[in-house]
Image: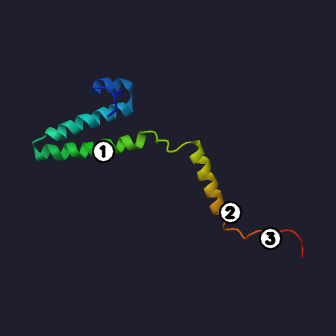
């Protein structure tokens, strides 16, 4: 949970779907931590897992690496495909 996350579900609902799900995730986690009923724990846990899955589906992917890493990855992928072709011969008909 980041410091910029809304404090309540009502506040989160005004911001957007992802923020609402993150606030709901926090609420469910607190409810699970304080739950005494096995029946309630089961349904809370199932809902918690569903919310986690929804968050993963709509959260924008995290950018890994920087521009240099992207260039290096592209060069590596080109290099691996180029290595499958036969080697070039040097000049002359010999």
Q: In which quarter of the image is residue 78?
A: bottom right
User: Residue 52: horizontal and vertical position, in percent?
Assistant: 32, 43
Q: Do the residues labelled 2 and 1 touch (CB within 8 Å)?
A: no
* Residue 64 located left or right of residue 50: right
Residue where numbered disc 1 is placed: 50
Q: Quadrant location of the C terminus?
A: bottom right
Q: Give the label, 2 or 3, closer to the camera.
A: 3
73, above or below 48, in the image: below
Q: Residue 83 carries which label?
A: none
Q: In which quarter of the image is residue 50?
A: top left
Q: Determine the secondary structure under disc 3.
A: loop
Crowdedness near tag 2: few (<14), some (14–19) or many (≥20) residues, C-alpha within 10 Å: few
User: Residue 16: horizontal and vertical position, in percent?
Assistant: 39, 28
How far is the residue under mark 3 from the one under mark 1?
59 Å
87, above or below 32, in the image: below
* Residue 21 located left or right of residue 28: right
* Residue 88 located left or right of residue 14: right
Crowdedness near tag 1: few (<14), some (14–19) or many (≥20) residues, C-alpha within 10 Å: few
How far is the residue under mark 2 from the one under mark 3?
15 Å
Q: Give the label, 2 or 1, closer to the camera.
A: 2
Q: Are marks 2 and 3 in contact (CB under 8 Å)?
A: no
Residue where numbered disc 2 is placed: 82
30, above or below 6, in the image: below
Q: Determine the secondary structure under disc 1.
A: helix
Name the foreground residue: 84 vs 15: 84
Name the foreground residue: 63 vs 43: 63
Residue at point 34% right, 32% down? 2
User: Residue 75: horizontal and vertical position, in percent?
Assistant: 64, 54
């Amino acid at each position: 949970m980041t410091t910029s996350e809304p404090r309540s579900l009502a506040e989160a609902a005004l911001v957007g779907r992802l923020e609402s799900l993150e606030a709901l995730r926090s609420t469910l986690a607190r409810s699970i931590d304080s739950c005494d009923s096995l029946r309630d724990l089961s349904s809370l846990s199932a809902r918690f897992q569903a919310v986690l899955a929804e968050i993963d589906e709509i959260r924008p992917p995290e950018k890994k690496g920087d521009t240099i890493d992207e260039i290096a990855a592209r060069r590596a992928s080109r290099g691996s495909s180029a290595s499958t072709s036969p080697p070039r011969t040097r000049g002359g008909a010999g």
